[in-house]
Image (cartoon, coloured by chain):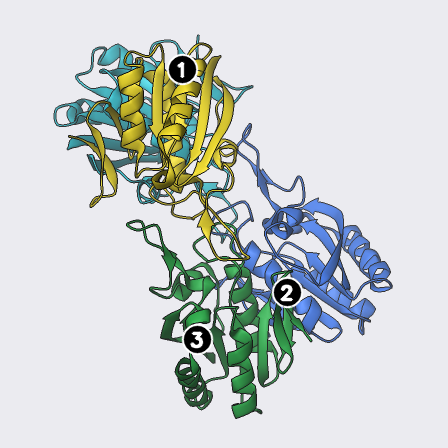
Chain colours: A cyan, B blue, C green, D yellow
Amino acid sequence: MKKITVITTGGTIEKTYDEYNGALSNQQSIFSKIQATLRLPGIQINQHNVIFKDSLDMDDTDREIILDIARQAMQTSDAIIILHGTDTLELTGSLLYREINTPTCPIIFTGAMRPYEFRDSDASQNVTEALFAAVLVEPGIYVAMHNKLLAFPGVKKDRAKLTFVKE
Amino acid sequence: MKKITVITTGGTIEKTYDEYNGALSNQQSIFSKIQATLRLPGIQINQHNVIFKDSLDMDDTDREIILDIARQAMQTSDAIIILHGTDTLELTGSLLYREINTPTCPIIFTGAMRPYEFRDSDASQNVTEALFAAVLVEPGIYVAMHNKLLAFPGVKKDRAKLTFVKE
Amino acid sequence: MKKITVITTGGTIEKTYDEYNGALSNQQSIFSKIQATLRLPGIQINQHNVIFKDSLDMDDTDREIILDIARQAMQTSDAIIILHGTDTLELTGSLLYREINTPTCPIIFTGAMRPYEFRDSDASQNVTEALFAAVLVEPGIYVAMHNKLLAFPGVKKDRAKLTFVKE
Amino acid sequence: MKKITVITTGGTIEKTYDEYNGALSNQQSIFSKIQATLRLPGIQINQHNVIFKDSLDMDDTDREIILDIARQAMQTSDAIIILHGTDTLELTGSLLYREINTPTCPIIFTGAMRPYEFRDSDASQNVTEALFAAVLVEPGIYVAMHNKLLAFPGVKKDRAKLTFVKE
């Protein structure tokens, strides 16, 4: 049974709707709701909800926290998945690539262009892909999204096509 | 076959998500998406998309437009349904009650506390109820929502309980 | 707060899938799953799961049980909803009409052409309509389905159009 | 842009419900419905609907047809996905392994324990995984299902746990 650590940090994928004020914001993690819809007999998931922010509001301190938790998680995990906002995913991924460089297990970022709470969200697809990459790929730092696995460095969001690409 | 006119005006029920800027706003009607999920063999629906606004942004001119279209629709409809934002539904309903008073067919407002595009939206329930009231009730001006039919005057939103009540 | 008794008897609406043998059958009630998706602040539901059968397999004893429970429920309920298979709904409805005739509260049958467990089921629509009729209509024995409320006697399934009609 | 050939053969994943007779059977492919829910900017899919059968009803002729089409598809595809019933997937996979042995591209079987048309189906997860494996893995003959990628030979259905395992 493989051990996978899931680090949640907010972002579009985790935004939820507040019926009192009509706002869409990061208040809680939605990862366990997605997990409940999937059949995952071969893995054990350990979830850390670390940050609840739109990734445009993340600062260097937030990224250092993610780096620290990823480093610790590497010691006990067969893979690490990081749920992250897409707008600055590139910055956090680049930091991990620079600081960790050769991780001892796959570290896989994912997120979504549309929050999980929406019917037509890409969140379930992307989380399914990140979990599958977690058991398939060599150690490295990646984005899994939209049927693509992209390895850092050189990964960035294509803001016109709303997906990730390699430079 | 009963003829039902559906007037859409925006509001929470019709808010949609823009993946480019992350905003939730009124750009188009979602009524036909709900209609496509329902079995309605006994009615014929004529849809008018009139306003695309959060109801907090509606002004007197908007309400006059709704009043005019409802008046015209009465001449050819067995019932009228108005999709409306919940925050000022009370104002538009009160205007129609004051100006039309004794309509020749049921005029039924509905809306939602959570946009239709969300998995856990109350939009489908409320539209199903409004369509059912349209074939069941006597002429009058009503809100159909959350398994309740409330007749104007004296209908208002309970902002703590997020539902409509009679004063 | 109105008191509604829900009597479940199986039928297509309640069929569930067994992954071991690939069969679709009546093993349990799905009513509470539908209830959990609806907003029903004005009613209190008391649920009795009485029979778990395809309605083609119901016999006179089954129909007598439904009649007895409906009779008892009338004493403490503001309305009664009966989930029933569509193939013999007409028989059970006719029995109740003949034996009870003038009920003290609305007794509303509903069901579905496609089991609730399917994405495109009409179950949620029909249950929403039955619950709404429960708070709106005069005492009587009805079917609520597909945006129609039909009063016994003379209600039957249109097997070509897959909906209920009045003779 | 990678070219992926999808061969559909029926099985549980593709069973659909007939409202006239209440039967669940293989009448058409559901693959394009799943495809419409996924974001797949990096691939081009060529779909062949070959067989419409519960895999317990497949015979040697059916398996030879699948083998022939897979052989042809290898010449123009970067990967092949085969939707197949789980009960005899092992037999078809073993045939392809024996006859093709070292394919020129990944050949990935998938299916589901619950038909796609059901709300709680594992079909979307499994197809997402098969499509992701199609762009990630080395040539070989595999099953992708439930967050596992299993290579033939020695793959079989665990009928107690309702998933695939390696002997």
Residue type pointed to by label 2: Asn
What is the CA distance from the residue labelled 1 to the residue labelled 3?
Answer: 57 Å
Q: Which quadrant would residue A11 be assigned to in this image?
A: top left
**Residue at the spot 50% in from the left edge and 34% down from the top edge:** D37
What is the CA distance from the residue labelled 3 to the residue labelled 2?
Answer: 20 Å
Q: Residues within 10 Å of mark 2 (few under 14, many from 20)?
A: many
Q: Is residue A30 left or right of residue B30?
A: left
- Relative to residue D72, is residue A34 depicted above or below? below
Mark identifier at residue C147: 2
Chain letter of the residue beneath label 1 in the structure image: D
Mark identifier at residue A163: none
The earlier-in-sequence mark between 3 and 2 is: 3
Residue type pointed to by label 3: Val
Residues marked 3 and 2, same chain: yes
Mark identifier at residue D71: 1
Instruction: Determine contact: label 3, label 2, CB under 8 Å.
Output: no
Give the total number of marks visible in the rendering.
3
Q: Nearer the viewer, residue D14 or B55?
A: D14
Q: Residues within 10 Å of mark 1 (few under 14, many from 20)?
A: some
Q: Which quadrant would residue A43 be assigned to in this image?
A: top left
Q: Residue beneath label 3, please?
A: C6
- Quarter holding the C terminus of chain D? top left
Instruction: Determine contact: label 1, label 3, CB under 8 Å.
Output: no
Q: Nearer the viewer, residue A85 or C49?
A: C49
What is the CA distance from the residue labelled 1 to the residue labelled 2?
Answer: 52 Å
